[in-house]
Image (spheres, rainbow, N blue to C red):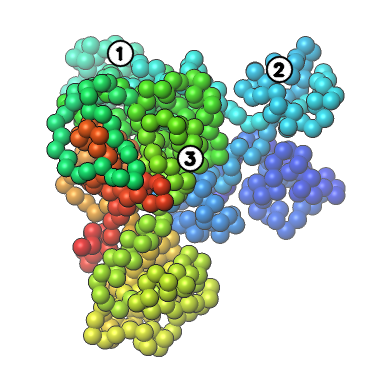
Amino acid sequence: MAQSATRNHIVSKGETITQIAKKYHTTNNVVFLLNPEAVDGVVEHQVLKIPITSNVQHQVEAKETVYGISKQYNIPIEKLYDLNPGLKEYGLQVDQFLNLTDSNNTVNNIIIEKGETIYGIAVKNNTTVSELYDLNPGLRESGLKVGHSIKLPNKVETKSVFSNNQLNNNDLEQTPKTIVVKPKETIYNITKSNNITQQELLKWNPELRSGLKEGDTLIVGFEKTTASVPSNSNTETPATKKIELSLSNDGIIRELVFLLPFNIATNNFLNPSIYKNLKSNKFLNMTLEFYSGAQLAINDLKNKNYPLNIKFVDSKETNSTLDVNTLKEDFDFASTDVIIGPFFQKNVDEVSETFKNQQTIIVSPLSTSKGKPYARQIHTMPNNGIIKKRMLEYLVSKQERIVAITDGDKTSKSYFNANYPSINVLSIRKNEKVAAETLRNLFVADGINYVVYEASSLTTSIELVRTLKSLQNEYDIRLAGLEKSETLDSSDIPIEDLVTLQYTFPSVTNDSKTYKKNNFDSKYKTTYGKTPTRFATRGYDVTYDVITRMFESDENVNIFDYGSQQIENKFSYINENGGVYNNAVYILYYDKDFTIKEAK
């Protein structure tokens, strides 16, 4: 159910939801999220929950789907994806908190005290005088009045405990050293062998107050993590003529900046135990997991001795805001060769626009949005159009019968007809059941029949899977999607059925188990005491790939002009409409042993 810090409001006679929402500087939809019964109207003396903070969230329970959550709160799936970066690519996790509202849509209020000035209030609350005037019509003309209230923009995340955006080298640019507790070890022995005090050990590992347990992973200090010599390179691919993305390999120290949403104002990074608290905040969790993977990649590259200066800078971003001008004032990007970040594509575009006249390469690490085509912006995540195209190219290459079933919501019949005329297209209405006889007229008996399912109705999905199973005695049928379908992942559709139909789908990550992946998981767990999430692996893959390209490409050669494969992600870039996009997509399928494997 929806959650937020709330206060109670008792409905007065004649009050409406609109009036109540306006009174508390929120919206009707936010009130409805916290009070579903209010959708049908409110009555006198009814008690409503009113959000104190603007961010309303939903905690994910077992077996829930994005589709089900979107229906529960009447929020479009695409809006949920927009509010929760990474959700579309990596799916739901049990106990995850999903944002249901934009945390920047509301305002705070303050009461004017004697002696206060507009300028003083703006500085104190990290805003501008013009923004205060915009939020408070009439304030410019009437001025401040003691005892009156004015609105403030909700900008908590823009404050910083540091004098600039660059994170202190003694804080985030360190990786925790860990040990695994052996039999009969004591706290005294651990402190002595690691040259630390008992107070430090307890500060870094608060759970020790409950006792020392064999097998526990403990933080016993921190190591500085800056990669620092040119490597040999044997890349032979010539630079693209369309876009020059080269770095001179002249031994000069280069600079890589990570522009990540640490939001230091609300997160105490001076406390090393933050590494033990990755689940306290889901957006922070995603950031720190990406960061932890990046740090592991940096450590793994130390032996290369690259002349590289690495900085971690707080982007202080949200899904709708990023103040690039303030970033430029607080951090000098003049010597920056590559920036990894921000997370949200809108903000990546803003950074690219700001630095379009200098040679800095901007790397978008997480977003699948196509964004704007900047010549020096690298989209490391394949966008939805590329994912769809690669899946269809794979299916067409099989030279078998392909039947596409679409309700037109995601992919129209005209798209198939214009781009893939060999595909037979069946248009259906929402919740329409596809008859077995209709499919018989489209299938062939002497080959494989790929059914490309592009409809969002759960009812249609359930019925279609049943029908396809019933026809398997007559035809060789494979079910396919142009993306990982939320409806087919529903608990209402047995995984056994998807296995039987060898459900095939595209993915930006390789979900199959490999030796390389198992080795990485083990190393990550040893370092951080937990299994890596997709964000951690993504942080490792993007960081390792980018740093390697910075130093292992020949002089004056396009460093993004060759393909590579890391732990879970692969990178192969194309130039399209003036932009640089990752074109590498995995084609996966459900195998008969109930594992996901890569299709060949």
Residue 442 position by quadrant: bottom left
The CA distance from mark 3 to mark 1 is: 48 Å
The CA distance from mark 2 to mark 3 is: 31 Å
Quadrant containing the C terminus in the rendered view: bottom left
Name the kind of residue labelled 1 in the image.
Gln
Element type at marker 2? Answer: helix
Residue closest to the eye, 17 or 345: 345
The CA distance from mark 2 to mark 1 is: 48 Å
Residue neighbourhood size for the residue with mark 2, other residues' Cα within 10 Å, grouped as few (<14), some (14–19), many (≥20): few
Residue neighbourhood size for the residue with mark 1, other residues' Cα within 10 Å, grouped as few (<14), some (14–19), many (≥20): few
Q: Is residue 525 visible?
A: no
Q: On the rendered structure, is 135 left or right of 492?
A: right
Residue visible at 37% across and 42% down in the picture? 378
Q: On the rendered structure, is 268 left or right of 291?
A: right
Q: Residue 85's x, y, as percent?
A: 46, 44
Name the kind of residue labelled 2 in the image.
Tyr
Residue 499 position (above or below residue 545): below
Q: Residue 234's x, y, as percent?
A: 14, 38
Q: Residue 394's x, y, as percent?
A: 28, 65
Q: Which residue is mark 3?
A: 349
Q: On the rendered structure, is 126 left or right of 395?
A: right
Q: Which residue is mark 1?
A: 198
Residue visible at 68% across and 33% down in the picture? 107
Residue 119: give its label: 2
Name the kind of residue labelled 3 in the image.
Asp
